[in-house]
Image: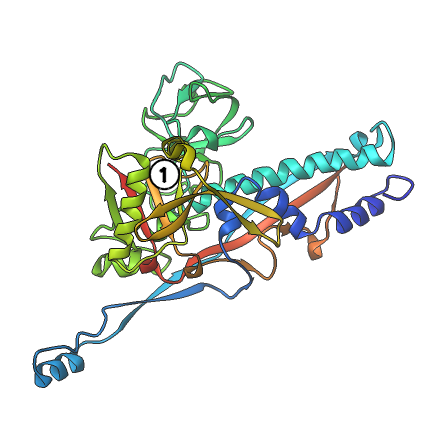
Amino acid sequence: MAAGVTEANIADWLERNYQPPKLGNIAFKDAPLTAWMPHDEDGGGELVVLRWRYGMSQGVGATYDQAKARADLSGLKAAKVLVDYETFYSVATVENTAIERAAGGNRAATNVLQRAINDAMEAHGDHLETFMFSDGYPALGQIVSGSSSTASFKVAADQIENFEVDLEIVFAASRTTGALRDSGDSLIVSKVDRDTNTITTSTNLSNISGLGGTDYVFLKSTREDDSTPDRQCLIGIAGYIPESVGTSDAFGDGTLNRSVDPFRLAGARITISAGTSVKQGLIDFFVRCGKYKIKPDALWCSFERWGDLIKELGNDVRYVDIENKKYGVTISGVRLFTPKGEVPVIASSKCPYANVWGLTRKTWKLDSVNGALIRPATRYQKALDSYNSDSVELRYRSFAQLECLEPHQNAIGTFA
């Protein structure tokens, strides 16, 4: 940074040192699914339009007349899916006095800014990864125990990593329907105990009127306070490839009912038998994917399952690294050898313990509007915005949507 810590100096330094690839390098280093997905930076338009084919032509028969008759009456169908782009922001405000008093002059000033940017990007990437495993209604977790007379509650072990100190949280009885508790009144997370899966809040839970013992917990602004809440976040793989497809299914902004052909419109659902080891369960899952003509490029599971797999493989464990060259991020996996070939198994801290997804990479696209997935959100995309409270503001935004181009080339497994 040039002599004298000025706003112009800071802006110039940010422009040179924190372009989108650098931001992504920080944000995605612990967000493997977000980094693994193909990124498309040319998104735009009013809505994303997807067309999924189903109902393959049944012009067949033991006689020509039968085959011709069915060919005339059946054929390829296409479902039109509409989804909108969604925004997510991260903001870091650095007081001018903190910059000015930084011992060591310019270098110390850049350290202050680097810490602020790193914290903002790590949080941004962490939440994007949560969204990637959701269906557009990304609950941080569900209360499993807690008393309204206290300021704490417990969540499941595979959900505790979704919480951080200082998050502002809201509550709802249902993940996808009904209004928020107490008109969206919120609490602040003051402590996260990862050993006991306990969240402590700034005030007693009784301050949220009507809070229930099995309520869902959301980051404020990611769940609408409405009886029929609209989605506020991008749709993740759990939306496109869900555990189940009901008869009243209504997917996307055009409310497509996928129950007419759940496999072709929502992927394959495979149950992994109870009592099966993780290794054998994943092998069975991958092999059974072949029954549906699916050959995933990667299997995605929780770190708990991944750790068990490594333990079961013992001396036979073999690792594989997948590189995202644009962002300089390495995604590490374990090679799983099956009768149907080899596949990497990759863990994410945001993947539910009960599930594994088999994903075919070419059938996905993480589509961001007119630029990188994370970029400055200031006026004219400047790296720095002035702020009127004796501070500078670093503001970043994602304006994007995940798209599945061919759901039937993907599968979800559920451990019974």
Which residue corresponds to the image point at 89% horizontal and 44% vertical from the top-left? 2
Position of residue 4 measured from the top left corner of the image (x, y, whole percent) = 90, 40
Left or right side of 303 for 251: left
Q: Residue at x 66, y 45 (%)?
A: 395
- Give neighbour class at mark 1: few <14, some 14-19, many 20+ (Cα, 10 Å): many
Occupied quadrant, residue 292: bottom left
Q: Quadrant of the C terminus?
A: top left
Question: What's the residue type where badge 1 is placed?
Answer: Ala
Q: In this figure, what is the number of numbered marks?
A: 1
Q: Residue furthest right?
A: 3
Residue at the disc numbered 1: 179
Which percent across, then down, holds residue 107? 83, 35
Any part of residue 234 in sight: yes
Colour approach in the figure = rainbow
Q: Position of residue 85 (x, y in %)?
A: 49, 56
Q: Residue at x 49, y 36 (%)?
A: 220
Q: Residue furthest front?
A: 315
Residue in the picture at 53% in, 39% down: 126
* Residue at the limit of the structure toward the top, as seen here: 149
Left or right: 290, with 106 as reference point: left
Nearest the viewer among 38 and 390 is 38
Label 1 residue SS: loop
